Amino acid sequence: MSRVVVVGAGIVGASCAYYAARAEWDVVVVERAQVASGTTSRGEGNLLVSDKGAGPELDLMRLSRRLWLELGDELGRDALELDEKGGLVVASTAAGLAALTAFAEGQRRAGVVADAVGDLGSVEPHIADGLAGGMFYPEDLQVQPVLAAQTLLDAAGARGAELVRGAEVLGFAAGAGADRRVGRPLGLALADGSTLEADAVVNAAGPWAGLLGDGLTAPVPVLPRRGFVLVTEPVGPMVRHKVYAADYVAAVASGEAGLQTSCVVEGTRGGTVLIGASRERVGFDDTLDPVVVRRLASAACAVFPFLREVSLLRTYRGFRPYCPDHLPVIGPDPRVPGLVHAVGHEGAGIGLAPATGHLVTAMISGALRSRRDPHSPDILDGVDARAFAPERFAAAALP
C-alpha cells in the first residue's frame, strides 16, 4: 500500500487524511503541535456560499457543501455540530443594497439560492432598525471547527490512518530533493533528526504553508493574515443566523496589508455570540490590539443594539493563510513529483475543506490530471482544478 503523508492536522489536513484513508491509502498525518491548534481553532466554523461570487471558488464551495452534508449523514451531525442555519447579508444604505442585489443575481445564475429580504426583523428579530435591507442565503452552514477536525481524523484513524503529534517537517532529507526520480519515495526530514518516507506528501500547513514550501524546494506565495474574533457571555438564541455586513465580501477580496474590519455576528449552540471580522498582514505577530477589538464591538452593536448591554468573555486571534489572488492552491507541484499543495484558503478553509480533501485524493490517485497522466480529466464533480493549480504563480513562485 502506498503512503501519503499529510503535513498539518487542521481542518484541511484532516479532510485530506479522511478522503485518502477512505481511498485505502496508508495515511500518516504529521502535526507539530495539536489537532486544529492553528487557524482551525481560531475560526468561526462558517461554510458559506453567500460571500463567493460566480467562479471557481463558488464551484468548490458548492461541492464542499454537498460533501459536508454527506459527512453529517455518515459521521453524525452532532459530531460536527453541523447546523443548516443560513446566512443573512445586510446593507445599511440604498447604494449598498443595490450592489448586494447585483452580486446576488450573479450568484443565482450560478445556482445559489439568494432571497431578498426587506423586513430584516422578520428574519432576525433583534436586528437594528433603519437598515436598507438584505439577502438571505439558506444554504449557508456552520460547524464547530475543532470538533469537526477531530471527528474527521478519528474517522480516518478508524480506517488505519496514523496521527503523529509534536513532529515538525523541515523539508526533504538529504538526497531526497526535487531532483529525485519519479516513483522514488520522498524522504522528509523532521526537526528531531528522524526521517519519514512517503510516496506522496500533502502540504496542508495553513499559514505556515509558504515556509514549508520553501523547505520542500517548492515555494508557494502563502502569507499569514491576522484576524480577531470576540466572544460574548451566553445570551441565548438572540442571533439566529450568520449575519454580516455587505462590505465583508469586499474586505475578504482586498489585497491591502493594512487593517480592515467588517461586521460579522453569529450565535453558537452554547448561547455565546461570535463577533468578527478583521484582516491585516502583520507577519506572525499575535499581539492583542485594543483598536481592533473596539472596532469590531462597535460595528456589531450598530447591527444588534442589544449587544451594548452584553459583556465580552474573551477575544482570540489567529492567522489565515492568505494567497494574493484569493484562491487556494490545490494540486500537484510541477517541481516535485509526489508533492501536492492544499493551502491558501484564507478564511474559507473550514468551508472548503471536504472538497479540497476530495480533490487532493483524486489527484494523488490519478483521477485528475497530473504531470504523469496528461490524459486524465481536469474537472471533477463540477470543479475545474486548473483554477487552483500551483502553476498559476509561475512568475512569482515557480522559478
Image (cartoon, rainbow, N blue to C red):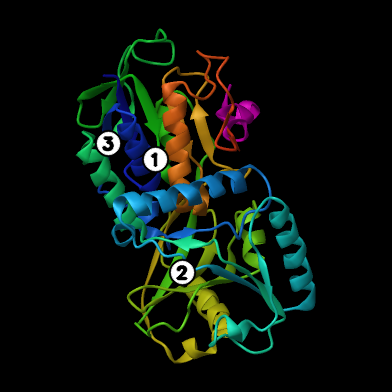
For the residue carrying disc 3, how many other residues have a C-alpha within 10 Å: few (<14), some (14-19), or many (20+)? Answer: many
Tell me where residue 194 sits by quadrant. Answer: top left
Query: Which residue in the structure is indicated by mark 2?
Result: 289
Q: Is residue 71 above or below residue 144?
A: above
Q: Earlier in the sequence, mark 2 or mark 1?
A: 1
Describe residue 256's horizontal placement relative to residue 347 as left or right: right
Tell me where residue 49 sits by quadrant. Answer: bottom right
Q: Earlier in the sequence, mark 3 or mark 2?
A: 3
Query: Which residue in the structure is indicated by mark 3?
Result: 30
Query: Which residue in the structure is indicated by mark 1?
Result: 205
For the residue carrying disc 2, how many other residues have a C-alpha within 10 Å: few (<14), some (14-19), or many (20+)? Answer: few
In the picture as drawn, the residue positioned furthest to the top comes out as: 181
Describe residue 62's horizontal placement relative to residue 22 as left or right: right
For the residue carrying disc 1, how many other residues have a C-alpha within 10 Å: few (<14), some (14-19), or many (20+)? Answer: many
Residue 126 in picture, x, y percent from top left: 53, 88
Alpha carbons under labels 3 and 1: distance apart:
10 Å
Residue 317 in picture, x, y percent from top left: 41, 62
Q: Secondary structure at mark 1?
A: loop
Quadrant of the frame with the N terminus: top left
Mark 1 is on which residue type?
Ala
Q: Residue at x 64, y 56 (%)?
A: 112
- Residue 32 in sight: no
Q: Secondary structure at mark 3?
A: strand
Instruction: Residue 388: say if magenta.
Output: yes
Range of residues picked out in magenta:
385-399
In the picture as drawn, the residue positioned furthest to the bottom comes out as: 309
- Do callouts 3 and 1 mark residues in contact (Cβ within 8 Å)? no
Alpha carbons under labels 2 and 1: distance apart:
26 Å
